[in-house]
Amino acid sequence: MWANYMEAFRLVFAPDVVIAIILSSIYGLVVGSLPGLSATMATALLVPVTFYLSPIAANATIIAASAMAIFSGDIPGALLRIPGTPASAAYTDEAYAMTRKGQAEMALGAGVWFSALGGIAGTISLMALAPPLAEIALSFSTFEYFWLAFLGLMCATLVARSSPVKAIAAMLLGLLVSCVGMENPGGVPRFTFGIADLLGGIEPIPALVGVFAVSEVMRAMLTPDPPPMPKRKFGSIMAGQLHLTKKYWWPMTRGNIVGIIIGVLPGAGADMAAWVSYAMSKKFSKEPEKFGTGHVEGLVEAGASNNASLASGWVPALLFGVPGDTITAIAIGVLYMKGLNPGPTLFTEKASSMYALYIIFIIANIIMIPLGIIMIRLASRILRAPRSGIMPIIVLCCAVGSFATGNSLFAVLTVAAFGVIGYVMEANGYPVAAMVLGIVMGTMVEQSFVTSLIKSDGSIVPFFERPVSAVLAALTIGALAWPVLYWIWRKFLLRPAHA
Amino acid sequence: MTKITRRSFATTAAAAAASLKLGPAFAQENYPNRPIQMICPWGAGGGTDATCRIVSALLEKEFGQPVNVVNRTGGSGVVGHAAIAGATPDGYTLGIITVEIAMMHWAGLTELTPKNYTPLALMNEDPPGIQVSSTSPYKTVKELADAIKASPPGKFKASGTGQGGIWHLALVGWMQAMGLPPNQVAWVPSNGAAPAMQDLAAGGLDLTTCSVPEARAMIDAGKSRCLAVMSPTRTKLYPDVPTLKEAMNIPYTTGAWRGFAAPKGLPAPIANKLTATLKKIYDSKEYAEFMGARGFGTVWNDANGYASFMDTADKQMGDAMKAAGIAKT
């Protein structure tokens, strides 16, 4: 054990590995902060580079770049209301509201601090609990995934500030968008109008960039400049974070745990972790009325959650070669290429390499703090730049970023179309975040529901029969029925007492 | 090192150009004298992308010109395949084309067929395996096949990819080879092989027919067993696993393959040069090591061999898709 750790330290502190970690961290920070370029994209673009690196350095680049990209997606979200990655979309409105209140440094500081803590918590779970966590992941069949995705969809009403009816309408529109294409269980093209580009469906990234970024630019063009934010020095980023940690240690821990569990489940990644944690934070908060007005509590929990899920997503990847999310899907390819074949033997025969990966996770999350602060300081200058200078650059970034996702003009047109949709929705009080949730979760809901029915020959009994599935079903139905029961209780059972 | 190669190549090329009369042949003799674009119809990070990138990296070394991989994803492969077929046939836009080119036109998704390309070389093929969960009562493929035959249609559930995907057709082909109806085993569409293998381990499925490298991690983790492979010879990854022919005397074989191609109408001198260079890459230690590490099978077919290979595959896929009721044309 100790010999393995000594060997692991030697592997990690080789010059090439250290250089790889630092360069890929900077790279991840920059890519993640550009609207339209996701953490997955950052990782995918690294693959050709890993051909030329040693096994540990190759994996170090992926670990470091993805962790940084998930955090730095918060930066444009907080400063411009444009989430850099889908994982930030859940709490973008909240972070932006804080910026408008003059608390940008607190919002971003919470982002970097709780991301780092979450990442470390996720790593510890990977180190200590990999085998039992992997067993949990393997006990999930499509029946369980259906309930999980359904629970995820229900977050739509929780995260939105508008009326629940409008939130559900927006979420259903998102579900409709996710029906486009032929990536459905039937393999049949739907709503494609004979256009080849629509066969693959609407990608979440261009849709997300459109509804958040482009619609924001459109709004800016139509409204007069908002009153300039009070000119002041950008305050300390880390001040107050320890206080927040003490005040919100339970939401943070809950965020970590939820993130770890969701991350371990193949197919549910950092995006879903952030949504669920933000919704939970609001549900269980002592002051839910403050959510959406620039309240840091949700940021703490969701920020801790999405980075925790990133590390635990490696558990099924390392043990069974099953990707926990799109990032680990790419990482598995690199592991094979470098002779670190996923499987239980990786933990015994190649133990020193495994420990080296753990150490890299910890290091990446620690250097995220200083590098993140530098990045935030540089990015905060955007707040002082004139709007007429910023907006064209955002549109340019959106176009370039979305073009890069598929190397086609179609994605750019998707961004434009969703920009208009997002603008119209916002103008009428429909929350765009709920629609994004529908787009992200729609495929999973449909896929898991239809395949489950095929497997059970059309019977819905297994949805309630399997043990884990039954628990999730009870949770879902309870959450659905709770408002109704509460209303009945208030209306009919309490009234006689008052009368 | 690259620099020297590049410079020495430039010198040779200049000398060659000087000794030749200027004319249309000049551009071809000089090929390649600018960067080459290599289109990959599938996303970055997947198996096709990895194959495409390693070959492009080696091609770059051979030619001394940059070979840039461009992922043209979307439309379930249609977009990228169309981009390769629609490019100018000058040798500066090449691409990796996959088994889907022999399937998509049957499903009515595109007009493109293997005939729309200048085939250069087939370099990889992976056969499907027949995998069951390690808790499954079936120890051999014969036991499994007998149980399938004895049960009502649709009782057994299999997965490995989406509806009408290559592994679905592999299952249909196997059923037909045994004289069973194509829907004897119900197909549960999945979003790729990894979720299917996970569901197999979770007890949601009876078998998967995805490729052996895709099933490898679960097999190595002791969660799954490979009972047979649908290929002419045993796979290098699991030399103990019999082929279908050995185990049941069923000669049915199929596989997912990847090869390199250019748009139709590529001048023969350029095509020949590319095929020769790809052969050199195929024989290189780097290619063998890379594909071996990923567990990907290597096969070689030159331009003519690849063309006839695709014709056969096209017919086989068409038959399986008609049987499965997925074909539109």
Image: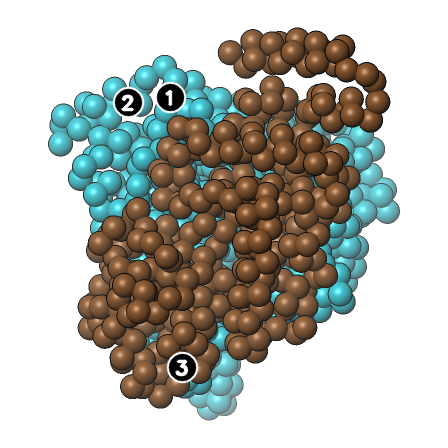
Indicate the chain on which mark 3 is placed.
B
Mark closest to the chain's N terminus, 2 or 1: 2
Q: Quadrant of residue B136?
A: bottom left
Compute the Cα span from label 1 to label 3.
Answer: 56 Å
Q: Are marks 2 and 1 in contact (CB under 8 Å)?
A: yes
Residue A349 versus residue B185 in the image, above or below: above
Q: Residue at x 56, y 48 (%)?
A: B306
| Mark 1 crowd level (few <14, some 14–19, many ≥20, 10 Å Cα) | many
Q: Is residue A256 left or right of residue B40?
A: left
**Residue at the disc numbered 3:** B180
**Residue at the disc numbered 2:** A11
Instruction: Residue B113 in the image: state x and y as whole percent.
Output: 67, 58
Residue A414 versus residue B51 in the image, above or below: below
Instruction: Residue A358 in the image: state x and y as whole percent.
Output: 29, 34
**Residue at the disc numbered 1:** A17
Q: Nearer the viewer, residue A235 or B96?
A: B96
Q: Quadrant of residue A286?
A: bottom left
Task: Identify the chain drawn in cyan.
Answer: A
